[in-house]
Amino acid sequence: MVTADEVWAALAEIPDPEIPVISLVELGVVKNVSVDDGTVRVDFTPTFMGCPALEAMQSAMESKIAALGAVPAINVRLDDSWSTDDITSEGRDKLRAAGFAPPAPRQVGKLELVQLQRGFRCPYCGSTSTKLENLFGPTPCRSIRYCENCRQPFEQMKTL
Amino acid sequence: MSKRTDLLLAMADDELILGWRNSEWTGIAPFLEEDVAFSSIAQNEIGHARALYELAAAELGTTADELAFDREPEEYRSAPLVELRRLEWARTIARHWLYETADQIRLHALKASDDEAIAGLAAKMDREEAYHRIHAEMWVDRLLATEEGGARLNDAVDELWPYALGVLDDELRPELRARVEERLGRKLPEVAPVPRGVHEAELQDLWNEMTVVRRSAPPGSQW
């Protein structure tokens, strides 16, 4: 009989389909794993709801669980239980190493433009002389920033 | 149809149709950043529509895709505001800002709902919509900063105001009025809202395009 720890270990091998340096477990989208008589139930939260990678994530989890000889039951939670604050510190280091600035912590209260215009650290040169170029980027979860020191555009995961 | 399903479908249809309209700027927005912004906002809105349709579908015993694509145009519950085809920048920004403001008022009311699924989904949507609102407000600032921009935005708001009121139920309309009047620094006319249930002629063309692939697929096709 498969254990919850074995399932967690298997899910930790699944890369994010769009930012493959980070795993689904490091991304924090796996909220809970429970094993009941050969059925593995996984509570999973989407990042952005329009993310086209959601179905790929679900089917990758189902395949991993099936490979452990269990029946997968993925429960998609559509509520506010995931935040970019749930990305693990290892995950944040990996994002940085791949040229993505990790998201800023979630603020109490309303999200303001001024918070997003702060000089976040450039993942390439470490300078904080950076500016917001575009709130929106190539995927729903990313913004575009520009480093005035090394003159390199870079992406930052949006805070959710 | 229950009141709950009716609410879910109204919101889902708003988000789907507006998402479609926003995506019409993909490739032709005034500059690249806006091309990316409107495409990304469209993707979010359609993601919200899918989640809302799924809740409605669970109650109706159908699927999100069937609700999104297999109804006749007159069965959609969308507000006429989102159906208008307005490929002109000031009107696009006015519609975007009016819709996002109305949507925020609606989401805040729903976050306090006793219905856990609806309150949870509204809270998640609101996190994403915060970026849309920042984007819309940034454009309102930018247009109001010049005489020509301000005039164009105000004209567009006047044209769209009865439509904007039609997005919300009666009890939420005063808040929308107060917020829009405060931002523009002027009173808006007392007008009859353009209600849900009537449709703009432009919806038919949108529907034809949106559903053409699904309608032309042989029965039993796997997607």
Image: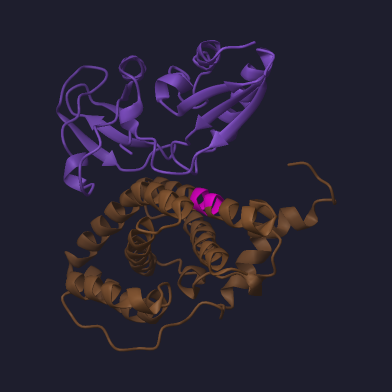
In the displayed structure, A151 sits above or below B5; it is above
Task: Give the color of chain A as drawn.
Answer: purple
- Horizontal and vertical percent for residue B107? 37, 59
In the displayed structure, B174 sits above or below A134; it is below
User: In percent of the image, x 67 and y 14: which residue is there?
Assistant: A67
Q: Is residue B63 visible?
A: yes
In this rendering, position of residue B15 left or right of residue B105? right
Q: Is residue A7 magenta?
A: no
User: In percent of the image, x 23 and y 25: which residue is there?
Assistant: A151
Colour brown maps to chain:
B
**B114, B163: nearer the viewer:** B114
In the displayed structure, A17 sits above or below B215; it is above
- Horizontal and vertical percent for residue A111? 23, 47
How would you classify the magenta stretch by its main secondary structure?
helix
User: In percent of the image, x 30 and y 89: which residue is there?
Assistant: B190
Please state the extent of the stretch shown in magenta in the rendering. B46-51
Q: Is residue B48 magenta?
A: yes
**A88, B87: nearer the viewer:** A88
Quadrant where the C terminus of chain A sits is top left
Number of marks in picture: 0
In this rendering, position of residue B20 left or right of residue B140? right
Extreme-right residue of the structure: B219
**B50, A9: nearer the viewer:** A9
Quadrant where the N terminus of chain A sits is top right
- Horizontal and vertical percent for residue B143? 23, 64
